Image (cartoon, rainbow, N blue to C red):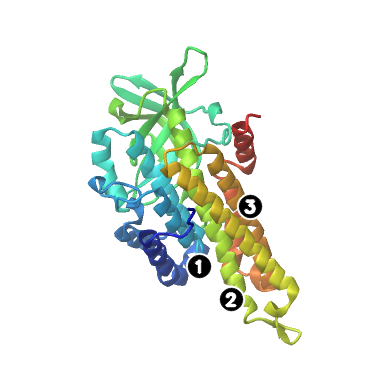
Amino acid sequence: MLDFRLDEEYEALRKTVEEFARDEVAPVIGDLYERNEFPYGIVAKMGRMGLFGLPFPEEHGGMGGDYFALCLALEELARVDSSVAITLEAGVSLGTMPLFRFGTDEQRAQWLPRMCTGEVLGAFGLTEPGGGSDAGAMRTTARLEDGHWVLNGTKAFITNSGTDITGLVTVAAVTGTKENGRKEISAIIVPAGTPGFTVSKKYSKVGWNASDTRELSFADCRVPEANLLGERGRGYAQFLQTLDEGRIAIAAVGVGLAQGCVDESLRYVGEREAFGHKIGEYQAIKFKIADMEVRAYNARLAYYAAAAKMLRGEPFKKEAAIAKLVSSEAAMDNAREATQIFGGYGFMNEYPVGRFYRDAKILEIGEGTSEVQRMLIARELGL
Protein backbone atom coordinates (compact mmCIF):
# COMPACT_ATOMS: atom_id res chain seq x y z
CA MET A 1 0.00 0.00 0.00
CA LEU A 2 1.30 3.43 -0.95
CA ASP A 3 1.74 5.90 1.90
CA PHE A 4 3.16 9.35 1.26
CA ARG A 5 3.10 10.41 4.90
CA LEU A 6 6.42 11.12 6.60
CA ASP A 7 7.28 8.75 9.42
CA GLU A 8 7.78 10.13 12.93
CA GLU A 9 11.53 10.62 12.61
CA TYR A 10 11.31 12.48 9.31
CA GLU A 11 8.41 14.61 10.55
CA ALA A 12 10.26 15.50 13.74
CA LEU A 13 13.25 16.63 11.69
CA ARG A 14 11.08 18.61 9.29
CA LYS A 15 9.31 20.38 12.15
CA THR A 16 12.58 21.16 13.93
CA VAL A 17 14.09 22.76 10.82
CA GLU A 18 10.83 24.59 10.08
CA GLU A 19 10.96 26.18 13.54
CA PHE A 20 14.67 26.97 13.20
CA ALA A 21 14.11 28.67 9.84
CA ARG A 22 11.21 30.71 11.19
CA ASP A 23 12.76 31.68 14.54
CA GLU A 24 16.49 31.91 13.76
CA VAL A 25 16.87 32.54 10.02
CA ALA A 26 13.90 34.73 9.08
CA PRO A 27 14.59 37.59 11.55
CA VAL A 28 18.20 38.19 10.41
CA ILE A 29 18.64 36.93 6.86
CA GLY A 30 17.23 40.01 5.12
CA ASP A 31 19.96 42.28 6.50
CA LEU A 32 22.69 39.73 5.80
CA TYR A 33 21.39 39.33 2.25
CA GLU A 34 21.43 43.05 1.53
CA ARG A 35 24.94 43.39 2.94
CA ASN A 36 26.16 40.35 0.96
CA GLU A 37 27.35 38.77 4.21
CA PHE A 38 27.87 35.07 4.73
CA PRO A 39 25.66 33.82 7.60
CA TYR A 40 28.38 32.45 9.87
CA GLY A 41 26.15 32.50 12.97
CA ILE A 42 23.37 30.58 11.23
CA VAL A 43 25.84 28.06 9.80
CA ALA A 44 27.30 27.47 13.27
CA LYS A 45 23.82 26.83 14.67
CA MET A 46 23.01 24.43 11.82
CA GLY A 47 26.26 22.64 12.59
CA ARG A 48 25.33 22.23 16.24
CA MET A 49 21.93 20.89 15.15
CA GLY A 50 23.71 18.22 13.11
CA LEU A 51 22.32 19.35 9.75
CA PHE A 52 25.71 19.15 7.99
CA GLY A 53 26.02 15.55 9.15
CA LEU A 54 22.49 14.39 8.37
CA PRO A 55 23.20 11.72 5.72
CA PHE A 56 26.48 10.43 7.15
CA PRO A 57 27.14 7.53 9.57
CA GLU A 58 27.76 8.28 13.21
CA GLU A 59 31.23 6.71 12.97
CA HIS A 60 32.26 9.70 10.84
CA GLY A 61 30.63 12.25 13.11
CA GLY A 62 27.33 12.29 11.25
CA MET A 63 23.74 11.87 12.38
CA GLY A 64 23.15 8.45 10.82
CA GLY A 65 20.31 9.67 8.63
CA ASP A 66 19.90 9.54 4.87
CA TYR A 67 19.77 11.78 1.81
CA PHE A 68 16.01 12.26 2.06
CA ALA A 69 16.47 13.71 5.55
CA LEU A 70 18.84 16.27 4.04
CA CYS A 71 16.27 17.13 1.38
CA LEU A 72 13.56 17.71 3.99
CA ALA A 73 15.87 20.11 5.83
CA LEU A 74 16.73 21.93 2.61
CA GLU A 75 13.07 22.39 1.71
CA GLU A 76 12.23 23.93 5.08
CA LEU A 77 15.22 26.27 4.98
CA ALA A 78 14.43 27.40 1.43
CA ARG A 79 10.87 28.27 2.44
CA VAL A 80 12.52 31.14 4.31
CA ASP A 81 15.80 31.74 2.48
CA SER A 82 17.73 30.08 -0.34
CA SER A 83 21.19 31.43 0.54
CA VAL A 84 21.14 29.44 3.77
CA ALA A 85 19.68 26.41 2.01
CA ILE A 86 22.28 26.39 -0.75
CA THR A 87 25.09 26.77 1.79
CA LEU A 88 23.90 23.56 3.45
CA GLU A 89 23.20 21.80 0.15
CA ALA A 90 26.61 22.56 -1.34
CA GLY A 91 28.38 21.85 1.94
CA VAL A 92 26.84 18.39 2.24
CA SER A 93 26.02 17.22 -1.28
CA LEU A 94 28.97 18.74 -3.12
CA GLY A 95 31.53 19.26 -0.38
CA THR A 96 31.34 16.29 1.97
CA MET A 97 29.57 13.59 -0.05
CA PRO A 98 32.38 13.01 -2.58
CA LEU A 99 34.82 12.47 0.30
CA PHE A 100 32.42 10.05 1.96
CA ARG A 101 31.66 8.18 -1.26
CA PHE A 102 35.15 7.96 -2.77
CA GLY A 103 37.68 8.95 -0.09
CA THR A 104 40.24 6.69 1.57
CA ASP A 105 39.98 5.87 5.26
CA GLU A 106 42.72 8.44 5.93
CA GLN A 107 40.95 11.16 3.94
CA ARG A 108 37.68 10.48 5.70
CA ALA A 109 39.30 10.52 9.12
CA GLN A 110 41.04 13.79 8.34
CA TRP A 111 38.03 15.71 7.05
CA LEU A 112 34.62 14.16 7.73
CA PRO A 113 34.29 14.71 11.51
CA ARG A 114 34.76 18.48 11.19
CA MET A 115 32.68 18.72 8.01
CA CYS A 116 29.78 16.84 9.59
CA THR A 117 29.63 19.41 12.40
CA GLY A 118 29.83 22.41 10.07
CA GLU A 119 33.16 23.51 11.52
CA VAL A 120 34.71 23.07 8.08
CA LEU A 121 33.06 23.53 4.69
CA GLY A 122 34.05 21.77 1.49
CA ALA A 123 33.53 22.92 -2.08
CA PHE A 124 33.16 21.18 -5.43
CA GLY A 125 35.37 22.53 -8.24
CA LEU A 126 33.89 21.43 -11.55
CA THR A 127 32.58 24.40 -13.57
CA GLU A 128 35.06 26.51 -15.53
CA PRO A 129 34.70 29.93 -17.20
CA GLY A 130 34.54 28.31 -20.63
CA GLY A 131 32.71 25.12 -19.72
CA GLY A 132 29.61 24.82 -17.58
CA SER A 133 27.20 22.29 -19.04
CA ASP A 134 30.03 20.87 -21.17
CA ALA A 135 32.21 19.52 -18.38
CA GLY A 136 34.16 17.52 -20.97
CA ALA A 137 35.64 20.80 -22.20
CA MET A 138 37.64 21.04 -18.97
CA ARG A 139 41.01 22.79 -19.22
CA THR A 140 42.28 22.62 -15.64
CA THR A 141 45.18 20.17 -15.55
CA ALA A 142 47.06 18.21 -12.91
CA ARG A 143 50.36 16.44 -13.58
CA LEU A 144 52.31 14.14 -11.31
CA GLU A 145 55.73 15.48 -10.39
CA ASP A 146 57.97 14.18 -7.59
CA GLY A 147 55.09 12.64 -5.65
CA HIS A 148 52.85 15.70 -5.98
CA TRP A 149 49.98 16.78 -8.19
CA VAL A 150 50.71 20.13 -9.82
CA LEU A 151 47.47 21.91 -10.73
CA ASN A 152 46.96 24.73 -13.24
CA GLY A 153 43.67 26.24 -14.33
CA THR A 154 40.58 28.16 -13.28
CA LYS A 155 37.19 27.24 -11.81
CA ALA A 156 34.10 29.46 -11.82
CA PHE A 157 30.92 29.86 -9.74
CA ILE A 158 32.15 27.66 -6.89
CA THR A 159 29.91 27.74 -3.79
CA ASN A 160 31.42 27.77 -0.26
CA SER A 161 34.93 28.12 -1.71
CA GLY A 162 36.14 31.27 0.04
CA THR A 163 34.59 31.44 3.50
CA ASP A 164 36.61 31.70 6.69
CA ILE A 165 35.67 28.08 7.45
CA THR A 166 36.31 26.59 3.98
CA GLY A 167 38.74 23.72 4.45
CA LEU A 168 39.11 22.23 1.00
CA VAL A 169 38.00 22.20 -2.61
CA THR A 170 37.74 18.95 -4.53
CA VAL A 171 38.96 19.85 -8.00
CA ALA A 172 38.24 18.04 -11.25
CA ALA A 173 41.30 18.18 -13.47
CA VAL A 174 42.64 16.60 -16.64
CA THR A 175 45.36 14.17 -15.59
CA GLY A 176 46.12 12.57 -18.95
CA THR A 177 44.62 11.10 -22.12
CA LYS A 178 42.71 7.83 -22.36
CA GLU A 179 43.36 5.16 -25.00
CA ASN A 180 40.32 6.38 -26.94
CA GLY A 181 41.82 9.86 -27.11
CA ARG A 182 39.43 11.41 -24.59
CA LYS A 183 40.56 13.35 -21.56
CA GLU A 184 41.36 11.46 -18.40
CA ILE A 185 39.70 13.42 -15.58
CA SER A 186 40.52 12.85 -11.94
CA ALA A 187 39.41 14.45 -8.66
CA ILE A 188 42.03 15.98 -6.37
CA ILE A 189 41.64 17.43 -2.87
CA VAL A 190 43.17 20.90 -2.54
CA PRO A 191 43.19 22.24 1.04
CA ALA A 192 42.46 25.92 1.56
CA GLY A 193 45.60 28.01 1.84
CA THR A 194 47.72 25.77 -0.37
CA PRO A 195 50.38 27.87 -2.17
CA GLY A 196 49.36 28.50 -5.76
CA PHE A 197 45.64 28.24 -4.92
CA THR A 198 44.04 31.69 -5.21
CA VAL A 199 40.47 32.50 -4.22
CA SER A 200 39.02 35.56 -5.96
CA LYS A 201 36.74 38.09 -4.30
CA LYS A 202 33.04 37.27 -4.08
CA TYR A 203 30.97 37.66 -7.21
CA SER A 204 28.40 40.44 -7.39
CA LYS A 205 25.31 38.27 -7.88
CA VAL A 206 21.64 38.77 -8.73
CA GLY A 207 20.57 36.38 -5.96
CA TRP A 208 21.85 34.01 -3.26
CA ASN A 209 23.58 37.10 -1.89
CA ALA A 210 24.17 35.66 1.58
CA SER A 211 25.99 32.65 0.15
CA ASP A 212 29.64 32.45 -0.88
CA THR A 213 30.42 32.05 -4.60
CA ARG A 214 33.83 32.67 -6.13
CA GLU A 215 36.26 32.03 -8.95
CA LEU A 216 39.29 29.90 -8.14
CA SER A 217 42.65 29.77 -9.85
CA PHE A 218 45.54 27.32 -9.62
CA ALA A 219 49.06 28.26 -10.66
CA ASP A 220 51.54 25.43 -10.15
CA CYS A 221 49.56 24.49 -7.05
CA ARG A 222 51.19 21.43 -5.48
CA VAL A 223 49.42 18.88 -3.29
CA PRO A 224 50.56 15.36 -2.28
CA GLU A 225 49.84 12.47 -4.62
CA ALA A 226 47.75 10.97 -1.78
CA ASN A 227 45.24 13.82 -2.28
CA LEU A 228 43.78 11.97 -5.28
CA LEU A 229 40.11 11.32 -4.49
CA GLY A 230 38.96 7.92 -5.72
CA GLU A 231 40.55 6.23 -8.71
CA ARG A 232 42.65 8.10 -11.22
CA GLY A 233 40.63 8.67 -14.38
CA ARG A 234 37.31 8.16 -12.56
CA GLY A 235 36.86 11.78 -11.53
CA TYR A 236 34.32 12.59 -14.22
CA ALA A 237 32.18 9.54 -13.36
CA GLN A 238 32.41 10.44 -9.67
CA PHE A 239 31.26 13.98 -10.33
CA LEU A 240 28.38 12.78 -12.49
CA GLN A 241 27.16 10.57 -9.63
CA THR A 242 27.52 13.50 -7.25
CA LEU A 243 25.49 15.71 -9.59
CA ASP A 244 22.73 13.12 -9.95
CA GLU A 245 22.29 13.08 -6.19
CA GLY A 246 22.70 16.84 -5.96
CA ARG A 247 19.85 17.40 -8.38
CA ILE A 248 17.43 15.88 -5.90
CA ALA A 249 18.76 18.22 -3.23
CA ILE A 250 18.44 21.23 -5.54
CA ALA A 251 14.89 20.09 -6.31
CA ALA A 252 14.13 20.24 -2.59
CA VAL A 253 15.48 23.80 -2.49
CA GLY A 254 13.24 24.70 -5.43
CA VAL A 255 10.20 23.19 -3.72
CA GLY A 256 11.00 25.14 -0.57
CA LEU A 257 11.20 28.41 -2.48
CA ALA A 258 7.97 27.63 -4.36
CA GLN A 259 6.19 26.82 -1.09
CA GLY A 260 7.62 29.92 0.56
CA CYS A 261 6.00 32.01 -2.17
CA VAL A 262 2.66 30.42 -1.29
CA ASP A 263 3.23 31.06 2.43
CA GLU A 264 4.07 34.73 1.94
CA SER A 265 1.23 35.29 -0.54
CA LEU A 266 -1.36 33.77 1.79
CA ARG A 267 -0.16 36.02 4.60
CA TYR A 268 -0.25 39.12 2.41
CA VAL A 269 -3.66 38.64 0.75
CA GLY A 270 -5.28 38.24 4.15
CA GLU A 271 -4.06 41.70 5.15
CA ARG A 272 -3.94 43.81 1.98
CA GLU A 273 -7.11 45.58 0.91
CA ALA A 274 -8.08 47.01 -2.48
CA PHE A 275 -11.41 48.47 -3.51
CA GLY A 276 -12.88 47.82 -0.10
CA HIS A 277 -12.04 44.12 0.11
CA LYS A 278 -9.14 41.92 1.16
CA ILE A 279 -7.44 41.02 -2.10
CA GLY A 280 -7.64 37.34 -1.17
CA GLU A 281 -11.38 37.57 -1.78
CA TYR A 282 -10.88 38.17 -5.50
CA GLN A 283 -11.05 35.13 -7.75
CA ALA A 284 -8.06 36.22 -9.81
CA ILE A 285 -5.87 36.13 -6.70
CA LYS A 286 -7.40 32.89 -5.42
CA PHE A 287 -6.65 31.15 -8.70
CA LYS A 288 -3.07 32.45 -8.78
CA ILE A 289 -2.38 31.05 -5.34
CA ALA A 290 -4.15 27.79 -6.15
CA ASP A 291 -1.89 27.34 -9.18
CA MET A 292 1.15 28.15 -7.05
CA GLU A 293 0.18 25.47 -4.53
CA VAL A 294 -0.30 22.94 -7.34
CA ARG A 295 3.21 23.62 -8.65
CA ALA A 296 4.79 23.21 -5.22
CA TYR A 297 2.77 20.05 -4.53
CA ASN A 298 3.69 18.38 -7.83
CA ALA A 299 7.35 19.32 -7.49
CA ARG A 300 7.47 17.88 -3.98
CA LEU A 301 6.06 14.57 -5.20
CA ALA A 302 8.72 14.53 -7.93
CA TYR A 303 11.65 14.89 -5.55
CA TYR A 304 10.12 12.47 -3.04
CA ALA A 305 9.88 9.86 -5.83
CA ALA A 306 13.45 10.45 -6.98
CA ALA A 307 14.78 10.23 -3.42
CA ALA A 308 12.84 7.01 -2.83
CA LYS A 309 14.44 5.34 -5.85
CA MET A 310 17.89 6.52 -4.79
CA LEU A 311 17.49 5.17 -1.27
CA ARG A 312 16.29 1.82 -2.63
CA GLY A 313 19.45 1.58 -4.70
CA GLU A 314 17.56 1.75 -8.01
CA PRO A 315 18.59 3.83 -11.04
CA PHE A 316 17.29 7.36 -10.50
CA LYS A 317 19.00 9.58 -13.09
CA LYS A 318 15.77 10.27 -15.00
CA GLU A 319 13.73 10.90 -11.85
CA ALA A 320 16.38 13.26 -10.48
CA ALA A 321 16.39 15.23 -13.72
CA ILE A 322 12.57 15.40 -13.73
CA ALA A 323 12.53 16.57 -10.11
CA LYS A 324 15.15 19.24 -10.74
CA LEU A 325 13.40 20.48 -13.88
CA VAL A 326 9.90 20.57 -12.37
CA SER A 327 10.93 22.15 -9.09
CA SER A 328 13.15 24.85 -10.59
CA GLU A 329 10.40 25.90 -12.99
CA ALA A 330 7.85 25.83 -10.15
CA ALA A 331 10.12 28.08 -8.09
CA MET A 332 10.56 30.55 -10.95
CA ASP A 333 6.85 30.63 -11.82
CA ASN A 334 5.77 30.97 -8.18
CA ALA A 335 8.28 33.74 -7.50
CA ARG A 336 6.97 35.68 -10.48
CA GLU A 337 3.34 35.25 -9.40
CA ALA A 338 4.07 36.10 -5.76
CA THR A 339 5.82 39.28 -6.82
CA GLN A 340 2.79 40.17 -8.94
CA ILE A 341 0.43 39.56 -6.01
CA PHE A 342 2.50 41.86 -3.81
CA GLY A 343 2.50 44.56 -6.49
CA GLY A 344 4.89 47.40 -5.77
CA TYR A 345 5.81 45.89 -2.43
CA GLY A 346 7.01 42.78 -4.23
CA PHE A 347 9.67 44.95 -5.86
CA MET A 348 10.98 46.07 -2.48
CA ASN A 349 13.81 44.16 -0.83
CA GLU A 350 12.18 44.42 2.60
CA TYR A 351 9.67 41.75 1.56
CA PRO A 352 10.82 38.12 1.21
CA VAL A 353 9.16 37.62 -2.18
CA GLY A 354 11.55 40.12 -3.75
CA ARG A 355 14.43 38.00 -2.44
CA PHE A 356 12.68 34.85 -3.65
CA TYR A 357 12.37 36.32 -7.14
CA ARG A 358 16.08 37.11 -7.24
CA ASP A 359 16.99 33.65 -5.97
CA ALA A 360 14.71 31.57 -8.19
CA LYS A 361 16.38 31.95 -11.57
CA ILE A 362 19.66 30.27 -10.65
CA LEU A 363 17.73 27.08 -9.85
CA GLU A 364 17.10 26.71 -13.60
CA ILE A 365 20.85 27.01 -14.24
CA GLY A 366 22.94 25.56 -11.40
CA GLU A 367 23.79 21.83 -11.16
CA GLY A 368 22.61 21.33 -14.72
CA THR A 369 20.51 23.76 -16.74
CA SER A 370 16.91 23.03 -17.64
CA GLU A 371 18.12 22.24 -21.14
CA VAL A 372 20.55 19.65 -19.76
CA GLN A 373 17.75 18.10 -17.67
CA ARG A 374 15.60 17.71 -20.78
CA MET A 375 18.57 16.18 -22.59
CA LEU A 376 19.08 13.67 -19.77
CA ILE A 377 15.39 12.76 -19.65
CA ALA A 378 15.28 12.24 -23.40
CA ARG A 379 18.42 10.12 -23.27
CA GLU A 380 16.93 7.93 -20.52
CA LEU A 381 13.89 7.44 -22.76
CA GLY A 382 16.17 6.07 -25.46
CA LEU A 383 16.13 9.13 -27.70
Q: Residues within 10 Å of mark 3 (few under 14, many from 20)?
A: many
Picture residue at 71% right of the left edge, 72% below the top:
285
Query: For the residue marked with disc 1, what is the amino acid?
Result: Gly
**Image marks 3 and 2: residues in contact by CB distance under 8 Å:** no
Picture residue at 65% right of the left edge, 73% below the top:
345
Which residue sits furthest front?
1
Mark 2 falls on what kind of element?
A: helix
Q: Viewer-proximal residue, 371 or 115? A: 371
The number of numbered discs placed on residues in the rendered structure image is 3
Horizontal and vertical percent position of residue 115: 31, 48
Q: Which residue is mark 1?
A: 30
Horizontal and vertical percent position of residue 109: 23, 40
Q: Which residue is mark 3?
A: 329
Horizontal and vertical percent position of residue 202: 48, 50
Query: For the residue marked with disc 3, what is the amino acid?
Result: Glu
Which of the 4 image quarters holds residue 280? Answer: bottom right
Mark 1 falls on what kind of element?
A: helix
Q: Earlier in the sequence, mark 3 or mark 1?
A: 1
Which residue sits furthest bottom?
276
What separation in Å lies between label 3 and label 2 (alpha carbons)?
23 Å
Numbered mark located on residue 267 in the image = 2
Q: Viewer-proximal residue, 117 or 153? A: 117
